[in-house]
Image (spheres, grey):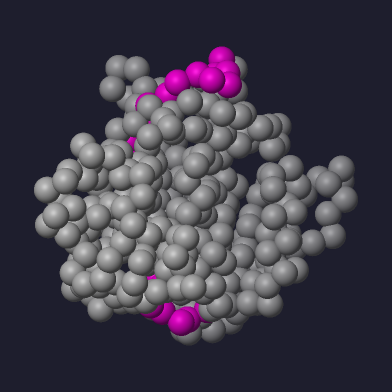
Amino acid sequence: MAYQVTLQPSGHSFEAAVDTTLLDAALDSGIHLPYGCRNGACGACKGKIVAGSVDHGIAQDHALTPADRDAGFALTCCAKPLSDVTLESREANAEDDIPVRMLPVRVQALLRAAPDVIVMKLQLPADERLQFLAGQFVEFLLKDGKRRAYSLANAPQDDRFLEIHVRLVPGGLFTQQVFSTLKERDILRIEGPHGNFQLQELSQKPAILLAGGTGFAPVKSIVEHSLHNRIARPLHIYWGARDRAGLYLPELPQQWAAQHAHIRYVPVLSEPQAADAWDGRSGLVHAAVLEDHADLSGFQVYACGAPAMIDAARRDFCAHGLPDAEFFADAFTFAPQ
């Protein structure tokens, strides 16, 4: 059995099964309610039940006091509907809607995806979750106040672990640490989320997702988020790398394209070697887009990678009809040590 939940002041609505929390049901419907710990301890998801009734579940008294309950408040991460509900709560649909937080994380896994790429899984404290939007990034807080920014590769709904894709940069302060001395169970500090590189969900235009190297990380987050929320607009994924090893998770986009008719995947190598045995597309990844789409006036483009790729793509895509306002970019730059 499911009940109807209506939000104020937005008027958005969704269904919530009797055994599902209001927060989980909202997120499953593509509605971003605010949250923090997701276990009734922090109070960040507190909203007011304007009409209807809920089971407060495991909400802890310090986060939801008896006075709060008497006043009609509930923690959406714990509350389950007992009837149709009208809930007064803000929604987090933009960068400014989600608070930036500083959190410790434990290294859960270091997976060598390529000779120069590590997929890092980070575990948050048991009573914490990091709310973010697909495409955003976090900053690692290093010694002497230095910071290094990395995109989140997991989708927002899959927030038990944070996934970071790290490419080795010779002499890089943080990447050298990741590849040489960092171990599982080590503790790091992060701050986030940051950034406004997100899929514009109100648009129905086909989207070109252009990734260079580990620029695939936010593209992965965006695609997995769109699949979770059943967004069926066409997605054209172009992933460029120097050699075959640079396409370090090749089966994943192939699987997306095989299982979903609205997704197309085109891998491109700029400098394939004989050992790559490559019979696919070669050259600059943004040039492959132009070979396939001479007129980009009806598209949106989301590009993530090196600044040179971003600049060339913006210039050439706009020359082929793409409105400048429909070009969204996240340029990866390397900070000097």
Q: What's the magenta region? A: 181-206
Q: Which of 174 and 311 is in front in this view?
A: 174
Nearest the viewer among 242 and 252 is 252
**Above or below for 19 versus 114:** below
Tell whether 15 sits left or right of 178: left
Q: Is residue 254 left or right of residue 141?
A: right
Q: Where is residue 18 drawn, in percent x and y? A: 44, 65
Q: Which of 170 and 157 is in front in this view?
A: 157
Residue at figure coordinates x 60%, y 71% from the top left: 236
By secondary structure, the bulk of the magenta-drawn segment is best described as loop
**Does the magenta-highlighted stretch encompass residue 236?**
no
**Residue 133 placement (x, y as % from top left):** 39, 56
* 318 shown above or below 38: below
Residue 102, relative to residue 46: is it above or below?
above
Q: Can residue 193 be seen in this view?
A: no
Residue under the point 31% across and 45% down: 59
> Residue at 68% of width from left, 64% of height from top?
256
* Quarter holding residue 257: bottom right
